[in-house]
Amino acid sequence: MAGGRDYLGSYRLVRLIRTGATCQVWEAVRDHERVAIKFLQPEVRNDKLEIGYLRHESEVGRRLHHPNVIEIHTFHIDRSIAFLVMEYHPGKNVKMLIRQGFDSFGYLVPKIIEQAALGLQYLHQQGWVHRDIKPDNFLVTDNGDVKLIDFALAWRIPTGLARLFARRTRVQGTRSYMAPEQIRGRALDGRTDVYAFGCMIYELLTGRLPFTGISPEDLLRKHLTGAIPAVMSGNRNVTPDFNDLVSQMMAKEPAERPASMEEFLRYFHAVRVFRSLPKPPSEQSAGAYP
């Protein structure tokens, strides 16, 4: 528990939900209200940069209100511990779902993709690019309802004249999902998240990352110049049309991708993901990715 006590501010910490490199997320309660509390790991608790990320996540998230985006309530500091109070969500993240095996969730994939895309579309409409789209940053319930989370790296999309003078961005994100322009530190927009979302869909459908490398530099080089892998090579049940859509999302040049999440959703609604819709676990025997 934080600081050896069971409380942060007026919130009683109940159980650890998940832990990451820099943060912990706990279920907490106050006056019978169930929430999630996010605070920094002890080793970075006094790191001004990490505190800044947490504060930034609060400033971005408190303005977002959408069924497919997590609600951020408040930011507080108690006993020198900075923390976020958020909507409690009972689901696991999509990365955990992938590790369970495709047969456990394959029948939900179209719903997961659509709801994740709607949350991301809304974020872009509010003027933000997420910059860290990956399976870990989408929560999903057992019936496939999805929430986008973690706005620590969210970047305001320049508009109007600001687009002409957009400054280079700090190279941040998760290497396995970073778009080429993000790696190069160039100005970003929603198409940067489209690329990362394409990488995530590839992983969702095949159980593996689209690119791997023998070193971090090699991995980034493959995002920059490597051939785009075909989803159909990892899942034979994917239709050619959807295979082509995912490949387009992962195009090296932003201009060659869907121009927005709205455009992606139009394409998505016009094609089928699967040749044959996967069955729920109760109707099929366990197995590997098709």
Image: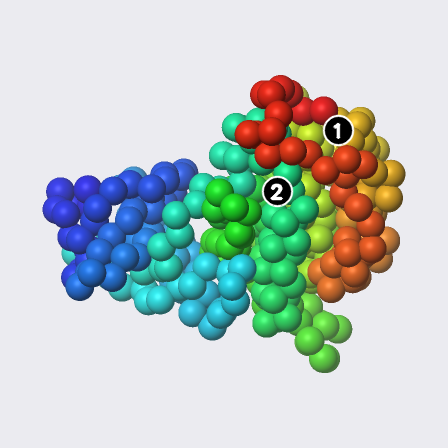
The residue lying at 71 percent from left, 45 percent from top is 198
Q: Secondary structure at mark 2?
A: helix
The residue lying at 59 percent from left, 72 percent from top is 126
Q: To which quarter of the image does residue 109 belong?
A: top right
Q: Nearer the viewer, residue 250 or 242?
A: 242
Are the residues at dot 2 and dot 1 in contact (C-beta closer than 8 Å)? no
Q: Nearer the viewer, residue 141 or 161?
A: 141
The residue lying at 82 percent from left, 50 percent from top is 271
Residue 235: mark: 1
Estimate the spatial distance between the alpha carbons at disc 2 and disc 1, rounded to whole Å: 15 Å
Q: Is residue 264 above or below residue 198?
A: below
Image quarter in which the N terminus is found: top left
In the image: residue 182, left or right of residue 30: right
Question: How far from the left and from the top, in percent, is residue 144?
Answer: 55, 47
| Marked residue nearer the N-terminal end (2 or 1) | 2
Q: Is residue 131 above or below residue 162?
A: above
Question: How far from the left and from the top, in percent, is residue 53?
Answer: 43, 57
Using the rendered image of the protein, determine whether residue 252 is visible from the camera's viewpoint: no
Task: Name the amino acid, label 2.
Answer: Leu
Image quarter in which the C terminus is found: top right
In the image: residue 121, left or right of residue 256: left
Q: To which quarter of the image does residue 162 belong?
A: bottom right
Residue 108: mark: 2
Using the rendered image of the protein, determine whether residue 6 is visible from the camera's viewpoint: yes
In the image: residue 251, left or right of residue 214: right
Q: Most extreme residue toward the front, as rendered?
A: 283
Q: Secondary structure at mark 1?
A: loop
In the image: residue 72, left or right of residue 104: left
Q: Nearer the viewer, residue 269 or 264?
A: 269
Task: Name the amino acid, label 1.
Answer: Asn
Question: How far from the left and from the top, in percent, is residue 251?
Answer: 81, 46
